[in-house]
Image (tube, rainbow, N blue to C red):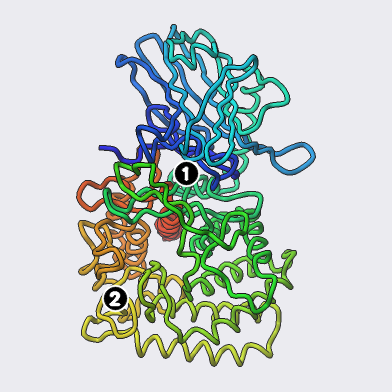
Amino acid sequence: MDNLDYGIIGNCRSAALVSKNGSIDWCCLPEFDSSSLFAKLLDEKIGGSFEIIVDDSYKITQRYKKHTAVLITKFTSGEDCFEIRDFMPRYRKPNGGYNAPPEFIRYFKHVSGKPKFKVIYDPKLEYAHGETKTYIKKNFIVSLTHGEKFDTCFLYTSFNKNAVIEGREIELTKDGYFLLGYNEKLFQPTVRKMYTELERTKVYWLNWSSKTPNYRKYNSQISRSAITLKLLTYDKSGAVLAAATTSLPETIGEVRNWDYRFCWIRDASMAIKVIGELGHRNVAKRYLQFIVDLIPDKDEKLQIMYGINKEKKLTEHTLDHLSGYKGSKPVRIGNAAYKQRQNDIYGILMDVIYEQLSKYSNDIENGEDLWGITKGIVWIVSNHWKEADKGIWEFRTEDRHFTFSKVLCWVAIDRAIKVARLFRKSNKIQKWTALEQEIKNDIHKNAWNSEVNAFTQSYGSSHLDASVLLMESYGFIHAKDPKYVSTVKAIEKELSNDGLLYRYKNADDFGLPSSSFTICTFWFINSLFKIGEEEKAMKHFDRLLSYSNHLGLFSEDIDFKTKRLLGNFPQAYSHLALIECAINFSKKESEEQVLESIS
């Protein structure tokens, strides 16, 4: 079964996906949201790929170098053995800043014997629009297209260039390399230089990962998920991507295919909160600056999402010449959801602002900006919280009074009050406290359905929704409150399918949902844990972890029957929720061990 068996490599500027057999099937350069030069992921015939072919006698295994984003694919046939170390260079420059060029390196390490391989090098620039022509030059191989746009890429290698392009067999007797870059190099690469790039990049990731605390349980999963979240951050602006891909379908053969190479305020803020809790302060600082830069006018409303370079217009197009992942069309670039109104984003953003200010209130460079944003958010929420919206799941039809949106409006005011206390702005607190209480009362009155015995998806509805489980996480209600406990139980009964959760079961713009949204299952596990069903939660968690791919990575969705990964990949949502669950379990075990040692 195809299970999105890919590893991600990247350098916080762009990313590539490498299959378990060592084929690069997705890569956009020079940046995450640029057009693809390899897109076999979205069209096996014309998408383009960079494949390493060995005969059937070879066993292929794949792993990450521990605590790094260096991906190692090992090819073994008896005495013959070699490894490919795939990475995108990233390391600190002597004069400050980071070296993160738009390129990837495939370092071939000769292990033993005389292994043989062939190369299929088939770049298809500009999403495979038009024809890409490839030429062998003295120092490199250049590929270019004159289609809708002119574009080029450059391949450098220590191997025979003709043998590479012609797909002839190559015998490996010593280390070698490929470097594929968006730009022509000023200095000719060498094996030694590529090894140095590999070591520098490895050291960068080891240093970064060393800041992540060690946990008693699930430490390797937390570390891998943290690195994955870091790989989805865009250094230049501070943006955080929802995922590295576009148009991987929520269900094979259906049309729920979206471009996720953008920064959703909700997804990004949730990710930043988790990364910040792990101690990676610089990522959080850059994201807050991204937000500050987006709101130059005090009365300017936040969009729900932006381009990674702060673009506000994300016009959606379809690439009809591509057949789509496993034939799932359309392939989309851009995302029309940027026009939607989703009132929850203000609470999620205020939650992150408060977290950062409470931790680093004596060392926040943009404190005045953040106080200005706080006041602006309160003004927007106070004027619009009673209005319907599209909700967290981005329903494209009519607006509704979604419970999650209302709860997060309450969170916005609650955190704004806490920020006002930090800044000793007592004149605001009394006014804002009345608003906070008004919203809270409104939710208890209109979102609770006594027949269902649960808080429901929207006001006046009987439908259940997994997002409501977050009421407790955001402090709206206590975990042991009977209303919350019965909501968890009702959601388990209605939305759980073999331990995996639907987001909701009612029909949306595209019919009935038919796959599990991975983050919802993590939310459910967390909720079980919080209401005291800890053993059951742990069993669900261990089983869910077993559905990851061979490298411990998750996409957006999981098929209920086959358990295969679906949706865009790797998904920030899934990995941030994994970390939250794992930390809760680990903290619990630590507390129990402390109590045992005392007694």
Residue 539 vertical position relative to residue 142 in the rendered view, above or below: below
Q: Nearer the viewer, residue 28 or 477?
A: 28
Residue 245 vertical position relative to residue 511 in the rendered view, above or below: above
Name the outermost residue toward the right: 95
Other-residue count near label 2 (Cα within 10 Å), few / some / many at <14 / 14–19 / ≥20: many
- Helix, strand or loop status at disc 2: helix
How much space separates mark 2 and mark 1, taking CA atoms? Answer: 32 Å
Other-residue count near label 1 (Cα within 10 Å), few / some / many at <14 / 14–19 / ≥20: many
Residue 229 vertical position relative to residue 292 in the rendered view, above or below: above
Q: Is residue 597 visible?
A: no
Q: Nearer the viewer, residue 36 or 13?
A: 36
Q: Who's the residue at 37% across and 69% down the image?
A: 395
Residue 306 horizontal/vertical position (percent): 56, 61
The reply to whether callout 2 and callout 1 are in contact (CB within 8 Å) is no
Q: Nearer the viewer, residue 439 or 1?
A: 1
Q: Who's the residue at 20% across and 69% down the image?
A: 493
For label 2, the residue is: 487
Rendering quarter of residue 483: bottom left
Image quarter where the C terminus lies is bottom left
For label 1, the residue is: 224
Q: Which mark is residue 377?
A: none
Q: Earlier in the sequence, mark 2 or mark 1?
A: 1
108 sits left or right of 92 in the view = left
Rendering quarter of residue 577: bottom left
- Helix, strand or loop status at disc 1: helix
332 sits left or right of 536 in the view = right
Q: Who's the residue at 33% across and 56% down the image?
A: 256
Check disc 1 and give the amino acid type.
Arg
Q: Is residue 190 visible?
A: yes
Check disc 2 and give the amino acid type.
Thr
Q: Who's the residue at 45% across and 31% down the image?
A: 24
Residue 212 vertical position relative to residue 58 in the rendered view, above or below: below
